[in-house]
Image: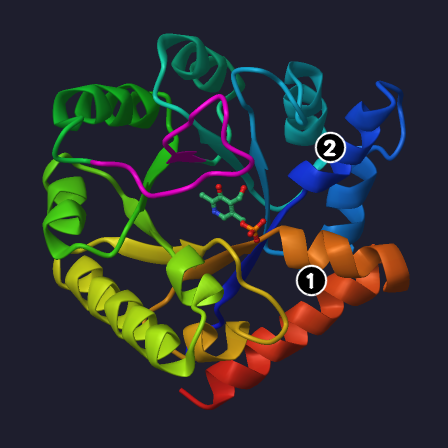
C-alpha cells in the first residue's frame, strides 16, 4: 500500500492578500503550516495576470519550503523562463484563459503537441519533473506519454461538479479509466480540481494514484478551523481511503 501524496494549493491565500494589495495573509506562512500539518508538497499557479501568486512568492517559497514546490503554469515563453530560473521540483502545465475564474479544463495535448513537447523538454533539461493537466480522454493521456511528460494530473472537476449520482458515477469511471491508461503508458498519475472533504475518498482509494492537489476546499475550511487542522483532516481522509484500496 502506497501513501497517496497531498499537494496543498495555496493560491487562495494569495488571493486574499491581493484583495488589499498588502502583505497578509502571507502565502509562505501558509505553505510552512501546511507542510507541518502533513502536506507532501506545495502547489501554486503563477498566472500571466499575477492575480494571486506573484513572482516574489515563488522565490521565497522555493527558498523556505522543505517538501516540493509544484509550479502550475501555462506553457508560454515567459513562464518557461521563470521556471528554468527557479527550478521548482515539479511543473504542471495547464491551459490558461484570462477571463476564467479557475483552470477550466485539461490541456488539449494533441492540438498543442509541439509546443508542449518543447516546453516539457526545456523544463526537464532544467531538472524539473513535468506533469500535464489533462482531461480523461485516453488519446490525450497517450499523447502526454508520447511527448515525454513524467506525469499527468487528471482533471477531477467533472467528477466534483456532477449534479446527480449517475453523473458522478460516470465521471468517476472516466477518472479511473484515465488512471489506468496513464499507468499503462508509464506515467505518474496525479489528480486534482474540485476535490473536497466529501468527495476525496473515492479518488484517494484508486490504486495507483500518486498525488492529489487540493486548494479551495482546504483554504475554505481553514477560515473556520485553521490551516493546520484543515490540512490534517484532509491528510487523515486520504490515509483512511488508502487503507481501503
Ligand atoms: N490542479 C490544478 C491543475 C489546478 O489548476 C487547481 C486549481 O488551481 C487545482 C488542482 C486545485 O483545485 P481546487 O482549488 O479546486 O482544489
Which residue is painted at 20% across and 58% down in the image?
182
Which residue is painted at 46% across and 90% down in the image?
244
- Tell which circle, 1 or 2, labels the residue nearer the N-terminal end: 2
Q: Which residue is mark 2?
A: 15
Q: Which element carries disc 1, helix, strand or loop?
A: loop
Is label 1's Cβ within 8 Å of ligand 1? no
**225 falls in the magenta region:** no
Predominant secondary structure, magenta span = loop
Residue at the limit of the structure toward the bottom, as seen here: 244
Q: Which residue is mark 1?
A: 38
Q: What is the quadrant of the C terminus in the image?
A: bottom left
Q: CA distance from mark 1 to mark 2?
A: 23 Å
Q: How many marks?
A: 2
Nearest-to-viewer mark from 1 and 2: 2
**94 falls in the magenta region:** yes
Is label 2's Cβ within 8 Å of ligand 1? no
Which residue is painted at 83% across and 39% down in the image?
29
Amino acid at each position: 500500500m502506497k501513501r497517496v501524496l497531498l499537494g496543498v494549493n495555496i493560491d487562495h491565500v494569495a488571493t486574499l492578500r491581493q484583495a488589499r494589495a498588502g502583505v497578509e495573509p502571507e502565502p509562505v506562512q501558509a505553505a510552512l503550516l501546511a507542510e507541518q500539518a502533513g502536506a507532501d508538497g506545495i502547489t501554486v499557479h503563477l498566472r500571466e495576470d499575477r492575480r494571486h501568486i506573484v513572482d516574489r512568492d515563488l522565490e521565497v517559497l522555493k527558498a523556505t519550503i522543505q517538501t516540493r514546490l509544484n509550479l502550475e503554469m501555462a506553457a508560454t515563453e515567459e513562464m518557461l523562463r521563470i521556471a528554468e530560473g527557479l527550478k521548482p521540483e515539479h511543473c504542471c502545465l495547464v491551459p490558461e484563459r484570462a477571463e476564467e475564474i479557475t483552470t477550466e479544463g485539461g490541456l488539449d495535448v494533441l492540438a498543442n503537441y509541439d509546443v508542449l513537447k518543447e516546453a516539457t523538454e526545456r523544463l526537464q533539461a532544467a531538472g524539473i519533473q513535468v506533469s500535464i493537466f489533462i482531461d480523461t480522454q485516453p488519446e490525450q493521456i497517450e499523447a502526454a506519454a508520447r511527448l515525454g511528460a513524467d506525469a499527468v494530473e487528471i482533471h477531477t472537476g467533472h467528477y466534483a461538479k456532477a449534479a446527480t449520482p449517475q453523473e458522478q458515477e460516470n465521471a468517476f469511471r472516466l477518472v479511473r479509466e484515465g488512471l489506468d491508461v496513464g499507468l499503462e503508458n508509464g506515467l505518474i498519475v496525479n489528480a486534482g480540481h474540485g476535490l473536497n472533504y466529501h468527495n476525496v475518498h473515492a479518488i484517494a482509494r484508486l490504486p495507483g494514484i500518486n498525488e492529489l492537489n487540493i486548494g479551495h476546499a482546504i483554504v475554505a475550511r481553514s477560515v473556520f478551523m485553521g490551516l493546520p487542522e484543515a490540512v490534517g483532516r484532509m491528510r487523515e481522509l486520504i490515509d483512511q481511503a488508502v487503507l481501503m484500496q
